[in-house]
Image (tube, rainbow, N blue to C red):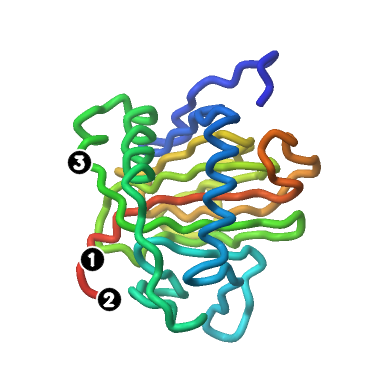
């Protein structure tokens, strides 16, 4: 966070909103501790393998539903077969607060009930190619929280991975929400920026990204 240069809330494109410095240091530190716990059991954090055999450079652990390219299951069949941990209620409520902050819409926030969380860890060399979050059966917004090293977050259009897109620098504590006309926009992380995270976070290096989603599912897909 840079208190000397305030960064305003920005509507990047309709439906996609960037809220800088939304999480304070205490909240970020607490989330780092929770992510460490989630990364070890019952399903360990891993780098998923996409069809064709390519291993992703970011590592992932899931709550609620287990994501593997490109489907959700209740058990981590590509890791150890264990059922994934539940999404805690406090995290659901944090997601509701995030939607309220992004859209200034309490009704939308109250109806937001994310049932899965994907926790991604990026080391300094990790990337995420342009993709759509389209395995869900719901058009509810995606809530994205950033902790640790800054990154370039590329937010594109709903038609292809190509331009037009907007590059946004996401710093530690930032919130990004996309829904409505931008819910199925292509997006990715082409670069992790150099620099060590604030020591108060309890994260020595790298970036944590927590995304909350409503799958709209009751049965495995």
Q: Does dot 3 land on a helix, a strand or a loop?
A: loop
The residue shown at (75%, 47%) is 204
Q: Does dot 1 land on a helix, a strand or a loop?
A: loop
Q: Which residue, as the protein is rendered here, is positioned at the far top?
A: 4
Which quadrant: the C terminus?
bottom left
Figure check: 216 above or below 47: above
Residue identified by numbered label 2: 220
Figure check: 195 above or below 208: above
Q: State how far apart marks 2 and 1 are (Cα).
A: 7 Å
Residue identified by numbered label 3: 111
x and y percentages locating residue 208 in the rendered image: 60, 50
x and y percentages locating residue 112 in the rendered image: 25, 43
Q: State how far apart marks 1 and 3 are (Cα).
A: 16 Å
Indicate which disc, 3 or 2, sits on the residue closer to the N terminus. 3
Which quadrant: the N terminus?
top right
Cβ–Cβ below 8 Å for labels 2 and 1?
yes
Figure check: 51 above or below 62: below
The residue shown at (42%, 57%) is 159
x and y percentages locating residue 70 in the rendered image: 42, 74
**Callout 3: 10 Å neighbours few (<14), some, many (20+)?**
few
x and y percentages locating residue 15 in the rendered image: 36, 38
Query: Any mark on residue 45, and which?
Result: none
Indicate which disc, 1 or 3, sits on the residue closer to the N terminus. 3
Residue identified by numbered label 1: 217
Q: State how far apart marks 3 and 2 are (Cα).
A: 23 Å
Between 103 and 100, the residue placed more toward the observer is 100
Q: Does dot 2 land on a helix, a strand or a loop?
A: loop
Between 107 and 155, the residue placed more toward the observer is 107
**Callout 2: 10 Å neighbours few (<14), some, many (20+)?**
few
Q: Is residue 192 left or right of residue 102?
A: right
């Amino acid at each position: 966070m840079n208190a000397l240069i305030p960064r305003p809330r920005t509507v990047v494109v309709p439906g996609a909103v960037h809220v800088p410095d939304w999480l304070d240091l205490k909240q970020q530190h607490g989330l780092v501790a929770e992510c460490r716990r989630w990364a070890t059991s019952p399903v360990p954090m891993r780098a998923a393998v996409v069809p064709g055999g390519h291993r992703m450079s970011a590592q992932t652990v899931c709550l609620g539903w287990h994501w593997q390219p490109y489907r959700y299951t209740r058990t981590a069949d590509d890791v150890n077969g264990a059922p994934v941990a539940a999404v805690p209620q406090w995290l659901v409520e944090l997601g509701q607060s995030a939607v309220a902050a992004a859209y200034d819409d309490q009704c939308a926030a109250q109806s937001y009930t994310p049932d899965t969380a994907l926790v991604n860890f990026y080391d300094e060399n990790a990337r995420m190619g342009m993709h759509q979050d389209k395995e869900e059966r719901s058009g509810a917004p995606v809530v994205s929280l950033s902790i640790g090293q800054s990154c370039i977050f590329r937010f594109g259009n709903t038609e292809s991975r190509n331009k037009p897109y907007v590059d946004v620098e996401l710093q530690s504590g930032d919130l990004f929400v996309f829904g409505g006309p931008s819910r199925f926009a292509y997006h990715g992380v082409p670069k992790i920026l150099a620099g060590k995270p604030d020591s108060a976070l309890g994260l020595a290096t790298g970036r944590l990204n927590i995304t909350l989603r409503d799958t709209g599912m009751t049965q495995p897909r």
